[in-house]
Image (tube, rainbow, N blue to C red):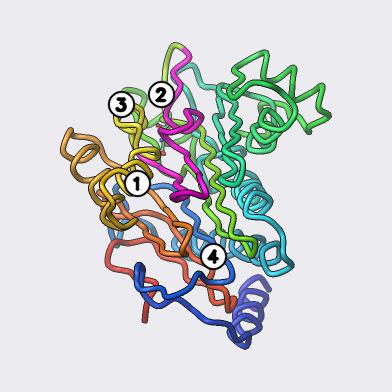
């Protein structure tokens, strides 16, 4: 049933006609719109996921792109698109964000999220929330309804309730597969499955959003890069929109998302080169791992990662979608 729906949607999209960028950084004029998503980076070699899981991840990514397509095609904003896409992935139990988040050392799910609007330079974030169904929406409310950027823990929960956002019992976030992995590796810390989206809309605006359960076994109120503006998320119409995933401490120390934008502006280099340097010359060179997705204002885009895989996808302005997992997959034929 789901497979038939996916096939029908793919066929419907492939019938639309608009200019499609072929490779990054060769664009003469910006595409009508563009959306990139990720579902986390890590040690994801071929053979590690059994076939059913491989298909389920791809269906999840495709579902998120379909949500974004509906919004961008109808003239919606990049901000609306990245929020809706991340909400979809937060509700999807396979990804490490919202429902399906990893467990802390104490066996809880603590969620972080952030969002940034490239057209205004405004940003919002929440960290360490445990009952908010969609932390990305709470992050957007922080941006739009408060003078603050980042709210944490109990205060963020109270704010979300006052805003009328949906809350859930902690059991909503529980998934057996994350629990089993956590029990099996109580001494280890791992991420995998953080979600993010970057978009360029018809109005020429950029936005970025990222959401996560963080690293499993995190302790003492640990907060990673995801809710730190400039580390895990960045968007500016002047440069680019970036959403990161990976070992968060390395992304904080290197302010990776902002570093991509800064390299473009100050070194006068393209998006792809800036992203490559930010990931490989800093994060990977220091012993970390991870990746990012990014779009610039001209519609150039990149998927950059130092790990063996990154769950990821792209929606082109003709409605064509491509989802990928392993490092040998590309979006171009
Ligand atoms: N960056 C996230 C964190 O450190 C985890 C991940 O992306 O896998 O919290």
Proximity of marks 2 and 1: CB atoms separated by less than 8 Å = no
Q: Relative to 5, say whether 52 is above or below.
A: above
- Closer to the camera in the image, 8 or 305: 305
Q: Which of the two discs, 4 and 1, labels the residue nearer the N terminus? A: 4
- Label 4 Cα neighbours within 10 Å, binned few <14 / some 14-19 / many ≥20: many
Q: Which of the two discs, 1 and 3, labels the residue nearer the N terminus? A: 3
What residue does disc 3 label? 253
* SS for callout 4: strand
Q: Which of the two discs, 2 and 4, labels the residue nearer the N terminus? A: 4
* SS for callout 1: helix
Q: Which of marks 1 and 3 is in front?
A: 1
Q: Residue 34's mark?
A: 4
Q: Relative to 73, say whether 252 is above or below.
A: above
For residue 146, which quarter of the picture? top right
Q: Residue 265's mark?
A: 1
For residue 63, which quarter of the picture? bottom right
State the image coordinates of residue 75 (x, y, percent, origin top left).
Answer: 72, 65
| Separation (CA) of disc 1 from disc 3 | 20 Å
Residue 89: tell me if it is visible. Answer: yes
- Label 2 Cα neighbours within 10 Å, binned few <14 / some 14-19 / many ≥20: many
Q: Which residue is drawn at 67% across and 61% down?
A: 67
């Amino acid at each position: 049933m789901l497979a038939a729906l996916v096939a029908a949607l793919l066929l419907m999209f492939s019938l639309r006609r608009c200019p499609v960028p072929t490779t990054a950084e060769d664009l003469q004029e910006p595409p009508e719109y563009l959306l990139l998503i990720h579902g986390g980076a890590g040690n994801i070699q071929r053979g590690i996921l059994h076939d059913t899981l491989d298909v389920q991840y791809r269906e999840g990514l495709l579902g998120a792109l379909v949500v974004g397509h509906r919004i961008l095609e109808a003239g919606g904003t990049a901000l609306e698109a990245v929020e809706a896409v991340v909400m979809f992935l937060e509700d999807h139990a396979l990804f490490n964000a919202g429902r399906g988040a990893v467990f802390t050392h104490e066996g809880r799910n603590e969620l972080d999220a952030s969002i940034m609007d490239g057209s205004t330079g405004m940003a919002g974030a929440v960290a360490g929330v445990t009952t908010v169904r969609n932390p990305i929406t709470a992050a957007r409310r922080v941006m739009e309804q408060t003078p603050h950027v980042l709210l944490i823990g109990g205060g963020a929960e109270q704010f979300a309730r006052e805003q009328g956002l949906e809350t859930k019992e902690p059991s909503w976030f529980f998934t057996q597969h994350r629990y089993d992995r956590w029990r099996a590796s109580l001494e280890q810390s791992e991420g995998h499955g953080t979600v993010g989206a970057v978009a360029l809309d018809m109005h020429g605006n950029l936005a970025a959003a990222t959401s996560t359960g963080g690293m499993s076994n995190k302790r003492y109120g640990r907060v990673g890069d995801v809710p730190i503006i400039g580390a895990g998320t960045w968007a500016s119409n002047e440069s680019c929109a970036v959403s990161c995933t990976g070992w968060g401490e390395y992304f904080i120390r290197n302010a990776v998302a902002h570093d991509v934008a800064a390299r473009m502006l100050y070194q006068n280099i393209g998006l792809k080169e800036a992203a490559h340097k930010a990931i490989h010359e800093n994060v990977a060179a220091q012993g970390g791992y991870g990746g990012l997705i990014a779009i610039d204002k001209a519609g150039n885009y990149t998927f950059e990662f130092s790990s063996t895989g990154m769950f990821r996808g792209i929606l082109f302005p003709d409605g064509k979608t491509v989802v990928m997992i392993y490092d040998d997959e590309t979006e171009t034929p």
